[in-house]
Amino acid sequence: MAEKKWVLMVSLAFIMVMSPLSSRIMESAQVQHLNMGELASLVLGKFQFWATVGNGGEKKTVESRAIGPNMTACHHSYGRPDLLVYCCPPGFEKSVPFVDFELPDSRSPVKVRRPAHLLDESFIVKYNKALSIMKSLPYDDPRSFARQAELHCQFCTGAYEQLNYSDTPVNIHRTWLFFPWHRMMIYFHERILGSLIGDESFALPFWAWDIPEAMPMPEYYVDENSAFFHTERDFSHFPPRVADLDYSTDQNHPHRSNDEQIDVNLKFMYTQMVSGARKTELFMGCTYRANDGYCDTTGTVEQAPHNTLHTWIGSSLNPGREDMGKFYSAAKDPIFYAHHSNIDRLWEAWREINNRRLDITDPDWLDSFFFFYDENLKLVKIKVRDVLDITKLGYSFEEVDHPWLNHRPPPSVPPKQARQMLKLKENKNQVFVPDFRPDGRVLDGSFTVKVFRPTKRESKEEEEEETVVVYGIEVKGNDYVKFDVYVNLSDETKMNPKFREFAGTFAHIPGGGAAMKKKTRLRLGVSELLKDLEADEDESIWVTVSPATVSCSNVSIEGIKIEYIE
Ligand code: C2O
């Protein structure tokens, strides 16, 4: 240990002496320009940084493993598992000087994002003008609409390598980078739009698909004579049809009336935002660190309504329901930005519901960084920690209700009666053992397993969240996959997210390269659900997995278990 400390001191001294020099060396060598902190962490990373943490004198590694792209290493990538795409910016090979992010001037007007269904005509005209100008900029201009769309392609397909780790791609979906990265992207997009029309107060609207009156696609997106129109969409989903937040496919799905759909949507939102999202990881997605490969466990809202609506909007005539249905093409559709403006708002809503107690404090998340061009054509380096206070970022959301907060789903069958019916099924051998290893079970039909709950630990159980984990999920095909999970479901005809038995969904858009094909898991928070179903004292529960898309026949799972998370 003493040796390590010695190496550390020498290298720190070396950095201090060399830093004015080294930055010049790096500049001339066309290496990405690094500041002192990064240089230090680079060197320290090599030696591992040992520091004494806590009073027991126990040692802990604190090497930074924040994620960031190597901007000079971009390459072809997989937009769909069967489609190689190229979305690198022109001239990426040459490093570009950048500036560190600075908060906007606090005296500039606040950008108030308004709900899309309440916009007045003059705003729509203004936005249409800004978007038309953006669409007319040449491809060389990083502010152009085409280049904005490519940004999304680059970070969803793994086109960039991680800084310091060639061969390891950067991916922002299905990880804890999902919310902050998209916030950054639309933050700059919004500022560019405003600057193109000289309006500092310009704010992106949000499509509030979680409130009943705003659930159909906003009208201006379907106006063929506007810059908002886009041909690659599913026209059968145009207004007045209410969006299906739990969308699977139109084929094996009963067509719901708008009123029925609204009811399902609100109860579904409750599960995704409230009862299923009571722990950080359940909402934010998995912990993703540099050189860790790819984590691939998606947060509740990212799967649905986020992924489900991407699929719902995209065209059924295209193999991957492009454009919105695949991430490499999604940001080419102007509705993408209103969709993500709402996702951004729901992130804030979730933080508020939990009094910000669940915010991530891990430095590897806080220090993860990206680069975006701003409205002045400057390349800006921005970290996750820079985007956690929207007031400081200069924008806000016009307040709308969260009607889903009081749409807690009721049990479909009285719990005692359900238990009798399930026991009967079990006697008829219609219930399986929850472990299908080593070969896995193909999801070609719905099935029920009986899962024993680990004996509860004495202390802290108040704080713990019980989760149902579907593990070893392998997705083989190219198509959108969705399956649903129910707990103590006794009547198959009540398989509907408007009932309490619904624990959550796996809604998956395949894409990216080999790194994104790892087996994954689905983790669903069920503590509140078990209370409502009066099963929180039982020693076992019945879990039903039900495929919602035909593509589930390309999916296999290894098993289902229960785990507690703190
Ligand atoms: Cu990066 Cu809505 O996807």
Image (spheres, helix red, strand yellow):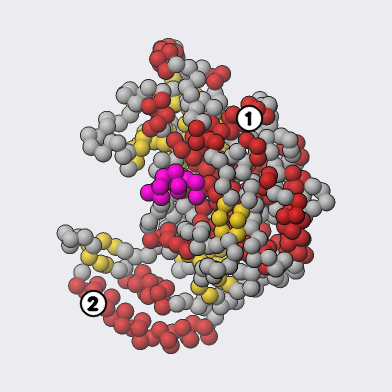
Residue 341, x across and y down, in percent: 60, 51
Q: Nearer the viewer, residue 27 or 270?
A: 270
Q: Nearer the viewer, residue 94 or 194?
A: 194
Give the quarter of the image for residue 60.
bottom left
- Three-letter residue code for mark 2: Trp
73 lies above or below 533: below
Residue 417, x across and y down, in percent: 43, 13
Q: Residue at position x 64%, y 58% from top?
A: 203
Q: Locate residue 336 relative to residue 3 in the image: left or right.
A: right
Residues rendered magenta in the picture: 348-358
Secondary structure state at the residue bearing disc 1: helix
463 lies above or below 345: above
Asked if residue 4 shows in the view, the reply is yes
Q: Residue at position x 59%, y 64% from top?
A: 109
Residue 307, x across and y down, in percent: 59, 43
Quadrant location, the N terminus = bottom left
For residue 261, the mark is 1
- Three-letter residue code for mark 1: Gln
- Dot 2 or dot 1, earlier in sequence: 2
